[in-house]
Amino acid sequence: MFRGVTQLTLDSKGRLAVPSKHREALLAHGEGRLVVTADPSRCLLLYPLPAWEPIQQKLMALSSFNDRIRVLQRLLVGHADDVELDSAGRILVPPALRVFAGIERQVVLVGQGNRFELWGDTQWRAFTEVALVVPGEDMPAELDGFSL
């Protein structure tokens, strides 16, 4: 449902104007309610609330006695914050999450199907440069036979 890369600017209060092409889908799928959380890649994930809830339920159903699982629970659920589209189609990106992702004013919103990633502009450019390096023989088996 969400795709494309859009460069945006946060306002002085840390609000993000969601591109109009995505607002209707966000209003239809969750009434404009979203969850913003941290991602291990140091970007933010933005999910419509109905898409986030099953993820949180599955993650919290896992054993917190496993250290790796507990780290993911802390990161994803612990940082999760509910936000809502305002009448101007903006969301407030929580200050703690902006600090986590190194987000200042210039940001990049990346559609990822059922969610968005939100990157600081500098971090996005650095990630893109690394992603352009051809990985060689370390391709996951799931990509065998995949073609564009």
Image (cartoon, helix red, strand yellow):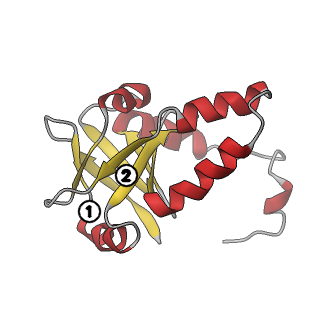
Residue 73 in view in this figure: yes
Coordinates of residue 143 in the picture (x, y in percent)? 79, 61
Q: Label 2 near label 1: C-beta < 8 Å?
A: yes
Image quadrant containing the C terminus: bottom right
- Name the residue: 42% across, 49% down: 35
Q: Quadrant of residue 31?
A: bottom left
Coordinates of residue 83 in the picture (x, y in percent)? 32, 48
The residues bearing labels 1 and 2 have C-alpha atoms spaced at a distance of 9 Å
Instruction: Give the class, few, some or many, for how many residues have Cα within 10 Å of label 1's Cα (few <14, many ≥20).
Output: some
- Name the residue: 66% across, 27% down: 71
The residue beneath circle 1 is 19
Q: Amino acid at mark 2?
A: Leu
Horizontal relation, residue 48 to residue 89: left or right: right
Residue 112 in view in this figure: no
First in residue order: circle 1 vs circle 2: 1
- Name the residue: 61% across, 53% down: 55
The residue beneath circle 2 is 109
